[in-house]
C-alpha cells in the first residue's frame, strides 16, 4: 500500500479547502477565455472580478465539453494561446448551457454539468469517523487527496486469516501433492491477510463515490481491492438560482433539499463502510484469495501472465515490466502470485491515483473466475 497523508493531515487539509472553495453556476455565455499577459496561459473570466487560472484537469474538461480534440487543445494552449482562447470563446457562446464551475485556492478546478451533485470530501470524512469509532479496532493505514480524488484506506487487524493454511487446503482440494517441492515452496510464500476497505471520492467529476472491500497482506503490505459495496454517481437535480435572474452567474450554496438528501446518503455510507469490514465480507474475500492460490502458472507462461494483466488493465510497458519482475522474484507462479506482483508494483508507482488503480487491478484478478483466468493464459 502506497503511503499517503496521516488522518490528521488529511482532516486539516479538507477543513482548509472547505473554507477556501467556491462553487458557481454560470451560463457559458457569461464566461470568456483570456490570455494571461505574463504567463501566456488561458484564464477563465466571468466568475469573480479577476480572471482565474485553470488546473490541467479543468482545461481537459473544457476541451471535452466543447468538443475540441484534446491534443489540439493542448497544442494551441502551448503554441498559440490566443487561438485557443478564440476557439474556446466561440464554442462557449455558440452552445449556451449552464455549468457548475468549482474553484479552489483562486483557480478553476473543475467544469461540470449543472446537474452535477457535489458530494464533498469533508462531509465524507465526517460520516466515516463514527463508523471507525464504532468498530473500535480499525486503523487508517493510508489516505490522500490528489487533484482528482480523495482516498481513505482502512484495515481491521482483528479480522485476519492465515493464507498459508487456506492455500494448503486449496492445493490439496486441487489434488496437489504437497511433497512436491514446487507446491510446498509456493505454500510457504503465502501470508496472513486482514480485512481492508478503500473509500474513494471525486469532487471534480473524476468518478463516483465508492466503497470497496479488500484484503491487506502483512508481509509486503500489499492491498488488493475487489468488492464494490457502494457506488454513488454525482448526479442530482439541476441547480436553481433563487436569488435573481437565471441568466446570471451566481455563487452556489447548499440548500435544505440537498442537505436532507446528503444526510441520508452519509448515514448509508457509514453503514456500508462498517459492513465491508464485517466478518461475513472478510470470509467471502478470503475464500477468493484461497481459490487464486490453486490456479497455477506454468514456467513457460510467466511472461504471458504479466502481458495478460497489462492488456486487461492498460498497464504501461514500465508497469508491466515491474509486475513481471515482482512475479519472478516471488517464485509464486499462481494467480495469487500474479495478484501480489500487481499490488506490490503499486508501491513503486509515483502517482497515488495510479497506485490505487493497481490495487483495484490486483483485486479484480483475485475475484476473477478460475476458468476465465485459464482461458486468458491459453490464448
Image (tube, helix red, strand yellow):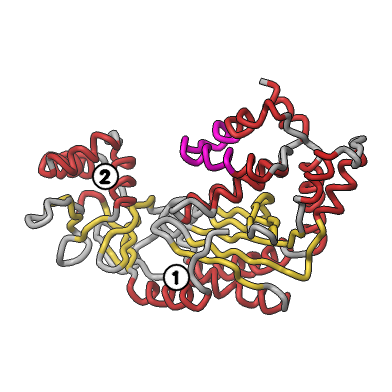
For mark 1, what is the residue?
255
Magenta span covers which residues? 309-325
Residue at x-position 78% and y-position 36%: 295
CA distance for labels 2 and 1: 25 Å
- Is residue 298 visible in the rendered structure shown here? yes
Residue 253 placement, left or right of 46: right
Q: Is residue 248 left or right of residue 221?
A: left
- The residue depicted at 25 percent of the width and 61 percent of the height is 249
**In magenta stretch: residue 312:** yes
Residue 326 on image: x %, y %: 60, 44
Taking the magenta stretch, the answer to whether it contains residue 354 is no
Q: Is residue 363 visible?
A: no
Q: Is residue 153 above or below residue 33?
A: below
Main SS, magenta region, reads: helix
Q: How many marks?
A: 2
Residue at screen point 78% across, 66% down: 159
> Furthest-top residue in view?
379
Q: Which residue is mark 2?
A: 96
Amino acid at each position: 500500500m502506497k503511503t499517503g497523508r496521516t488522518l490528521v493531515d488529511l482532516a486539516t487539509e479538507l477543513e482548509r479547502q472547505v473554507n477556501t472553495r467556491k462553487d458557481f453556476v454560470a451560463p457559458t455565455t457569461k464566461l470568456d477565455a483570456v490570455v494571461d499577459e505574463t504567463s501566456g496561459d488561458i484564464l477563465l473570466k466571468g466568475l469573480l472580478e479577476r480572471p482565474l487560472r485553470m488546473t490541467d484537469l479543468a482545461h481537459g474538461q473544457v476541451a471535452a465539453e466543447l468538443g475540441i480534440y484534446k491534443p489540439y487543445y493542448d497544442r494551441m494552449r502551448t503554441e498559440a494561446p490566443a487561438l485557443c482562447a478564440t476557439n474556446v470563446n466561440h464554442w462557449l457562446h455558440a452552445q449556451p448551457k449552464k455549468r457548475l464551475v468549482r474553484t479552489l485556492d483562486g483557480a478553476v478546478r473543475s467544469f461540470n454539468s449543472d446537474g452535477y451533485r457535489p458530494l464533498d470530501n469533508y462531509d465524507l470524512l465526517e460520516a466515516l469517523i463514527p463508523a471507525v469509532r464504532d468498530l473500535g479496532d480499525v486503523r487508517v493505514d493510508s489516505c490522500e487527496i490528489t487533484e482528482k480524488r480523495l482516498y481513505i484506506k482502512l484495515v481491521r487487524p482483528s479480522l485476519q486469516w492465515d493464507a498459508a493454511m487456506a492455500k494448503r487446503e486449496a492445493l490439496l482440494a486441487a489434488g496437489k501433492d504437497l511433497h512436491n517441492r514446487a507446491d510446498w515452496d509456493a505454500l510457504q510464500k503465502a501470508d496472513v491477510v486482514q480485512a481492508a476497505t478503500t473509500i474513494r471520492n471525486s469532487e471534480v467529476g473524476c468518478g463516483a463515490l465508492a466503497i470497496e472491500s479488500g484484503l491487506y497482506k502483512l508481509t509486503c503490505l500489499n492491498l488488493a481491492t475487489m468488492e464494490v459495496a457502494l457506488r454513488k454517481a454525482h448526479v442530482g437535480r439541476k441547480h436553481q438560482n433563487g436569488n435573481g435572474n437565471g441568466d446570471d452567474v451566481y455563487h452556489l450554496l447548499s440548500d435544505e433539499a440537498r442537505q436532507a438528501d446528503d444526510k441520508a446518503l452519509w448515514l448509508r455510507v457509514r453503514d456500508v463502510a462498517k459492513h465491508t469490514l464485517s466478518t461475513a465480507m472478510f470470509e467471502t474475500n478470503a475464500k477468493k484469495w484461497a481459490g487464486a492460490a490453486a490456479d497455477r502458472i506454468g514456467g513457460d507462461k510467466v511472461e504471458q501472465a504479466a502481458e495478460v494483466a497489462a492488456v486487461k488493465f492498460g498497464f504501461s510497458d514500465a508497469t508491466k515490466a515491474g509486475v513481471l519482475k515482482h512475479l519472478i522474484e516471488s517464485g509464486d507462479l499462481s494467480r495469487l502470485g500474479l495478484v501480489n506482483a500487481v499490488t506490490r508494483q503499486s508501491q513503486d508507482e509515483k502517482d497515488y491515483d495510479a497506485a490505487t488503480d493497481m490495487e483495484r487491478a490486483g483485486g479484480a484478478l483475485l475475484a476473477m473466475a478460475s476458468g476465465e483466468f485459464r482461458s486468458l493464459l491459453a490464448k
